[in-house]
Structure formats: C-alpha cells, structure tokens
C-alpha cells in the first residue's frame, strides 16, 4: 500500500487487563468506534506509528507525482494532457492533506520532508518503477490507484479523526483516477497493434509491483496486530490483495489483456481467484532502495528541495518584512 | 490563411506553449503549494488552448481539429510570442515570465471581451476569470521574491533583464490582430512600474525587442525542442487514437 510495512511499537497487543487505566480508557474508546482527536491523550506508540504511517502515505503521494509527471509533457492530446495534469495536481493535494494530518501529531511538514530526503522515511515501493509508454498512464490509474483505493476506503473509518477525514476527501478523487486510468487502457487495448502491445506490456510490468503494494503476508506480525487493535490498519494484507485480484481479473478480461500469471484461476470453493505471489525478493530489494528508478526519484526530490531553498527563504524574508512594517505602522 | 484563423492560433499557441512550459514543473516545484498552483495554471492554459485552437479549426473549416493544430504543426506554423517559449531556467525566470505574460494577457482578454465576434468575446470572458487569478498570483510572487533575500532579489532582477527583450513583441501590431495590441501598452506599463517598485526591481532601459514569434517568421531554438517532446506520440503513431 502507500504505507507498507509500517512498524508499530512491536511489543505485542496488551489485553485490556494489562493496561493502565488511561490506556485502557483509550482502547475502549477505539473499540467503541470513537474518533481520537489531536488534543486527546494517546499512547506514545499510537502517535509514533501514526506519524510513520501518515508520513509514508504523504511521501508516496509526493513521489508518486514523478512517474506520471514523466508523461505530462508527452500526453498525446490536449484533453489527455488536461486530465493527467488534474490527476497529478490531485496527488499533490493528497500529500498536502496528509502532511496536515501528520502535523496534528506534533511533527512538521519540513521535518517529515527532511526524513524523506535523507532516506530515514520511505514511500511506497510502486513509485520506484519506471513509466515507459503512454499505456503506463492507464496502468497506473487502473492498477496503482485501484490498489490504493482497496486500502484507503476502509481507512476512512480509521480511529484517528484527522487521518480519517483526509481519507474521505482523498477517496473521492482516487476512484475518479482509477476510472480515468481504465479509460486510457480501453483506448489502448482497442487501438492499433502498437497500442495493444503497449497496453499488454504495461500490464506485464505493473501487475507484480501492484500486488506488492499490499505488503507481504501479515502472518503473525506483532506490528500488524497492534495497528489493527488501534484501528489504524483495518484489514490484513492478504485479504486486500485477494480483493484486488478478484476485482481486477475480470476487468483485464474485459480489456482483452492477459494477466501475466499462468496460475490465475477462478476458485469456486473460496469464491475468489487463485493467483501467484509476486516476486518478494524483488520487493525487498526495492525496499532497500534498489528499485529501478529509486535513485532517480530521490535525486529529483532532493534537487527540487535544494533548488527551491532560495524561493522558500525569499518568501519567508518578505513575509517577515511585511509583518515588521505592519507592526511599525500600528 | 484568414486573419481570424491566424489570430486564434496566436492566442491558442500562447496558452499551449506557456501551459506546456509551466507543466514541466510538475512534481519538482520549490514547495508543495507551488506544485499545486503551477499545475492549476497549466491546466487553465491548456483549457484555453482547447477553446482557441478549436475556434481556429472551425474557422479553417478543413479536417484539422484543435489536437491536429497542436500536435501536427511544426515550428514555423506556431504563432506564439517568443516570451512564452523561453525555457524555465529557474523558478524566478518562470514566475517573471508568467507575470509579464499575465499582465499582457489580462489587458488583452479585457479588450477582447468587448469584441463583436461572439465566440472570441465568450472565450475571452471565460479566460479572463482564470487569468485574473494567474496575474494576482504571479504579481505576489514577483513582489515577494524581488523584496525577499539578497539572493532572491538578484535572481528576479536577472530574470527580468534576461526576459526584457521579449516584452516588446506583445505590443507589436499587424492586420491579423483582432484588436490594436499597441493600445494595451500604457496600462501594462503602469502596472509594471507599480509591481516592480514594490518588488524593488529595476526596469531595464533598453527598448530593443526580439520579434518573429507571433508572425512565425523566426522562433527561438527552444520551441523546436519543446515540440519534439510534446508531439512525439502523435508523430510516432499517426494512426492511433488516444
Ligand atoms: Fe493520491
Ligand atoms: Fe495515488
Ligand atoms: Fe490517485
């Protein structure tokens, strides 16, 4: 997902009896479906895990602008250019809402940005893959935004108020992105021989990385268990991956494209598709920073930040002068 | 080619080329708010392109549509001002270029709103709402960075000096212009003096101007590279529908 393998406090979930009264009252509020708000008391681990998760999600929106930005200047029609610009603008907006949500937990956007830029914080593995043809703009909307929605829709009910509210706004736009992506795929899959080839190639390259977005099987991960108890993770990774495959396989068939998995097969008994696991070795390589475009993504973000320093400083200096002048006039 | 076709191409090519330039900032602006604002400006300009080039295609009445005009013409058929094809260089150049163009565009659209050509008047009226906001924003940015730190001041002054020889072309006038563009200069100059004053920037003395963009006689080298990127897909796959 946009926030993959976020480590929580990692001591295992305490039972209500093991908790001190404050913590117990907090957990009972969560169990009752209450929203936790910024001024409320919360366990340090809850705060820390949320900062990591929301921060990683925000960074993903920001870095996620790059693979699609890669095609804005080459969009093949004025309308496609406008739609793609609007989409990438939405993603920047998502980053902004999420940074604002994270800031309510006592960390600043600049601090989070510095952590992204020096590698202390991560962003979703998916944005380390290249976008090589126009069909990739379709595949990203269809598969990547599609996978993101799987996890973000339930997060609208997450226990932390500002995060849940950010998700409500984001989800509306994400489903629009997915439809637009699918629309590009339709055009490509029903287009010329070259376009069909681009569409199949895009699906071949993005299928595995999209499945990886959900993260490896939770198994008996203590992190997942704690995050689920806190309702900042709403579903297991395998459960969401299954939902995604079940939703996507018929869509691929409708497009006349072949999912690159020979084992993919409808299983009547479980009421879902059987499918092959993606290459988890590749996933861990990507997490270590070895994604095909990882170095370029970080270079681009670092360059943008460094080149923009004089602009941010100039804006601040001017704002300070204006404030001083206003004070002097009073 | 009819004068009206030529004029619609001038307006449409300005917004297309500048919209494209601004869109090159996607994902790499100095702050997130600027990423969003620049995308928004690019989006408005591409929308205006659809209207102007759509009108041009209608006037021409052959089988070309707005996309064919945008993606299948070569450099010599583009009719945009030289100013808007100038490369982004840094954020200062980008915002100075934006301000100089917005200040002209604002006056231009204001005048076109009064045209008795109903389509021109309608496009101008719709665009003017967007451009009023663009101008507000680029004005604020030029003032803030001009009057910011020593570095931001110097960068903005450099940008102004570098772009200044492209300002005069906006006010050159010929038969193809739907209105007398030279009549826009006094209002432009008054605004410029006010904004540069607040920005503590100095207007260059020179009255020299490069020309050849809006007539297509001689573009700068930068435009060819932009079109090579922008038109690559429709050129490589001429039979494809996207
Ligand atoms: Fe998003
Ligand atoms: Fe997204
Ligand atoms: Fe999205």
Image: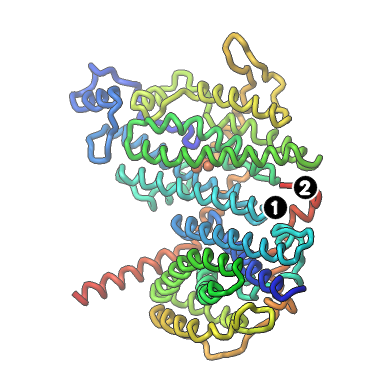
Labels 1 & 2 near each other (Cβ < 8 A) = yes
Relative vertical location of residue B174 with respect to residue B83 in this rendering, above or below: below
Residue sitting nearer the eye, A115 or A72: A72
Residue A66: where, in percent of width, then height? 57, 50
**Residue shown at the point (49%, 37%) measured from the top left:** A2
Residue A278 occupies which quadrant of the picture? top right
- Please state the chain letter of the residue tagged with numbered disc 1 in the rendered image: A
Relative vertical location of residue A222 with respect to residue B33 in this rendering, above or below: above
Residue A284: where, in percent of width, then height? 56, 32
Q: Residues within 10 Å of mark 2 (few under 14, many from 20)?
A: some
Q: Residues within 10 Å of mark 1 (few under 14, many from 20)?
A: many
Residue A87: where, in percent of width, then height? 55, 48
Relative vertical location of residue A240 with respect to residue A71 in this rendering, above or below: above
Mark number displayed over residue B240: 2
**Residue shown at the point (64%, 67%) measured from the top left:** B12
Is A53 left, or right, of A138 in this rendering? left
Within 8 Å of ligand 3, the CB of disc 2? no
């Amino acid at each position: 997902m946009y926030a993959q393998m976020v480590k929580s406090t990692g001591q295992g979930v305490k039972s209500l009896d093991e908790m001190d009264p404050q913590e117990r009252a907090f957990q009972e509020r969560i169990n009752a479906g209450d929203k936790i708000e910024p001024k409320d008391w919360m366990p340090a681990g809850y705060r820390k895990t949320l900062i990591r998760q929301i921060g990683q999600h925000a960074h993903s929106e920001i870095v996620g602008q790059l693979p699609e930005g890669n095609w804005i200047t080459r969009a093949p029609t004025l309308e496609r250019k406008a739609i793609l610009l609007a989409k990438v603008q939405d993603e920047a907006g998502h980053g902004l809402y999420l940074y604002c949500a994270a800031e309510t937990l006592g960390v600043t956007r600049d601090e989070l940005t510095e952590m992204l830029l020096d590698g202390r914080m991560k962003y979703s593995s998916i944005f380390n893959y290249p976008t090589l043809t126009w069909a990739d703009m379709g595949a990203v909307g269809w598969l990547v935004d599609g996978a993101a929605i799987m996890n973000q829709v339930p997060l609208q009910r997450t226990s932390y108020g500002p995060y849940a509210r950010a998700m409500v706004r984001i989800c509306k736009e994400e489903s629009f992105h997915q439809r637009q992506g699918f629309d590009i795929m339709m055009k490509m899959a029903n287009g010329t021989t070259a376009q069909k080839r681009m569409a199949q190639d895009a699906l071949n390259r993005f299928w595995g990385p999209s499945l990886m977005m959900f993260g490896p099987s939770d198994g008996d991960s203590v992190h997942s268990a704690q995050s689920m108890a806190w309702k900042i993770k709403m579903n297991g990774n395998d459960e969401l991956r299954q939902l995604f495959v079940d939703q996507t396989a018929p869509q691929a068939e409708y497009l006349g494209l072949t999912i690159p998995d020979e084992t993919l097969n409808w299983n009547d008994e479980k009421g879902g598709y059987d499918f092959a696991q993606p290459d988890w070795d590749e996933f861990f390589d990507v997490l270590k920073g070895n994604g095909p475009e990882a170095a370029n993504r970080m270079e681009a973000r670092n360059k943008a930040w460094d080149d923009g320093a004089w602009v941010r400083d100039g804006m601040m200096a001017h704002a300070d002068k204006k404030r001083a002048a206003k004070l002097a006039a009073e | 080619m009819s004068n009206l076709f030529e004029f619609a191409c001038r307006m449409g090519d300005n917004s297309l080329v500048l919209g494209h330039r601004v869109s090159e900032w996607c994902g790499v602006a100095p702050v997130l708010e600027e990423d969003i604002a620049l995308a928004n400006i690019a989006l408005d300009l591409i929308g205006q392109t659809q209207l102007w080039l759509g009108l041009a295609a209608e006037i021409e009445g052959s089988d070309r549509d707005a996309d064919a005009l945008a993606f299948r013409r070569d450099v010599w058929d583009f009719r945009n001002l030289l100013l808007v094809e100038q490369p982004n260089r840094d954020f200062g150049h980008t915002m100075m270029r934006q301000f100089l163009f917005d200040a002209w565009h604002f006056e231009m659209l204001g005048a076109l709103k009064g045209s008795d050509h109903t389509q021109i008047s309608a496009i101008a009226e719709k665009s003017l709402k967007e451009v009023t906001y663009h101008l507000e924003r680029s004005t604020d940015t030029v003032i803030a960075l001009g009057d910011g730190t020593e570095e931001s001041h110097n960068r903005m002054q450099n940008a102004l000096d570098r772009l200044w020889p492209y300002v005069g072309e906006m006010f050159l006038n010929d038969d193809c212009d739907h209105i007398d563009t030279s009549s826009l200069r006094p209002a432009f100059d008054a605004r410029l003096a006010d904004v540069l004053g607040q920005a503590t920037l100095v207007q260059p003395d020179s009255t020299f101007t490069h020309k050849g963009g809006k007539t297509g006689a001689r573009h700068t080298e930068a435009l060819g590279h932009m079109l090579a990127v922008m038109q690559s897909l429709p050129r490589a796959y001429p039979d494809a529908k996207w």
